[in-house]
């Protein structure tokens, strides 16, 4: 799984999008620019407006029994009894895979928004879905705790999406002013 919303600088991303609009305007002839500012705005807005991130309801898939490394899980104390810190200790657990369908450009999940924290969500991108896993132990974790883990990760993904959607909205609303200044 990869960290989301972290590998591309958002300020740079939006500056490049603004530069693309400016370059397109600069390629137009003087008569094209003077013919109809309104139609130019409509055309450039249609072409350059970014669709915000939207999610559908998550889907949970039980992936069955798995071996989970408990080496650093304080609930089990395995770290106290290991001679070699490099060797993991395993316990049988279960895995739920959460699929969160989205409709936006996949590239958005690489962009760091202007607002962020040091806690980043982790997921894989597969066929227009973010997929993350939640491992648990049936003999230790209650159904409420498992649901809480799923909700926490989903909420973190949504929080970052909302922050980026705010940046996208600001960019979209700036398109007309970019056109007007050219």
Image (tube, rainbow, N blue to C red):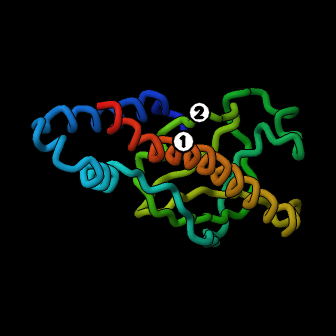
* Quadrant in the picture for the C terminus: top left
Residue 69 lies, in percent from the top left, at 70, 46
Q: Is residue 71 left or right of residue 181?
A: right
State yes or no: discs 2 and 1 in contact (Cβ < 8 Å).
yes
User: Residue at point 57% right, 70% down?
Assistant: 56
Of residues 37 and 123, which is closer to you in this image?
37
Figure label count: 2
Q: Which residue is mark 1?
A: 167
Q: Is residue 170 left or right of residue 59?
A: left
Residue 32 lies, in percent from the top left, at 13, 44
Mark 1 crowd level (few <14, some 14–19, many ≥20, 10 Å Cα): some
Mark 2 crowd level (few <14, some 14–19, many ≥20, 10 Å Cα): few
| Label 1: element kind | helix
Of residues 95 and 50, which is closer to you in this image?
50
Q: Is residue 67 left or right of residue 178?
A: right
| Label 2: element kind | loop
Among the two numbered marks 2 and 1 on one chain, the one whose residue lies closer to the N terminus: 2
Of residues 51 and 55, which is closer to you in this image?
51
Q: Which residue is mark 2?
A: 114
Compared to residue 182, the image places residue 57 above or below, namely below
The image's mark for residue 87 is none
Of residues 45 and 80, which is closer to you in this image?
45
User: Residue at point 44% right, 58% down?
Assistant: 104
Distance between mark 2 and mark 1 Cα atoms: 7 Å
Q: Quadrant of residue 70?
A: top right
Residue 111 lies, in percent from the top left, at 49, 38
Residue 170 lies, in percent from the top left, at 52, 42
Compared to residue 28, the image places residue 68 above or below, namely below
Compared to residue 30, the image places residue 41 above or below, namely below
Q: Quadrant of residue 51?
A: bottom left
User: Residue at point 27% right, 33% down?
Assistant: 22
User: Residue at point 39% right, 43% down?
Assistant: 176
């Amino acid at each position: 799984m990869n960290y989301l919303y972290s590998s591309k600088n958002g300020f740079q991303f939006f500056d490049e999008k603004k530069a693309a609009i400016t370059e397109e305007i600069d390629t137009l002839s003087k008569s094209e620019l003077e013919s109809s500012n309104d139609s130019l705005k409509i055309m450039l807005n249609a072409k350059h407006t970014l669709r915000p991130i939207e999610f559908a309801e998550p889907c949970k898939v039980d992936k069955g029994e798995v071996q989970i490394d408990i080496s650093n899980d304080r609930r089990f104390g395995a770290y106290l009894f290991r001679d070699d810190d490099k060797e993991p200790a395993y316990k049988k657990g279960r895995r739920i895979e959460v699929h969160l369908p989205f409709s936006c450009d996949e590239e958005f999940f690489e962009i760091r928004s202007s607002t962020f924290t040091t806690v980043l969500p982790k997921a894989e991108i597969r066929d227009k879905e973010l997929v993350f896993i939640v491992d648990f132990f049936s003999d230790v974790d209650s159904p409420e705790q498992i649901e809480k883990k799923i909700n926490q990760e989903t909420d973190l993904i949504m929080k970052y999406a909302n922050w980026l959607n705010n940046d996208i909205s600001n960019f979209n609303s700036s398109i007309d002013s970019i056109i007007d200044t050219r």
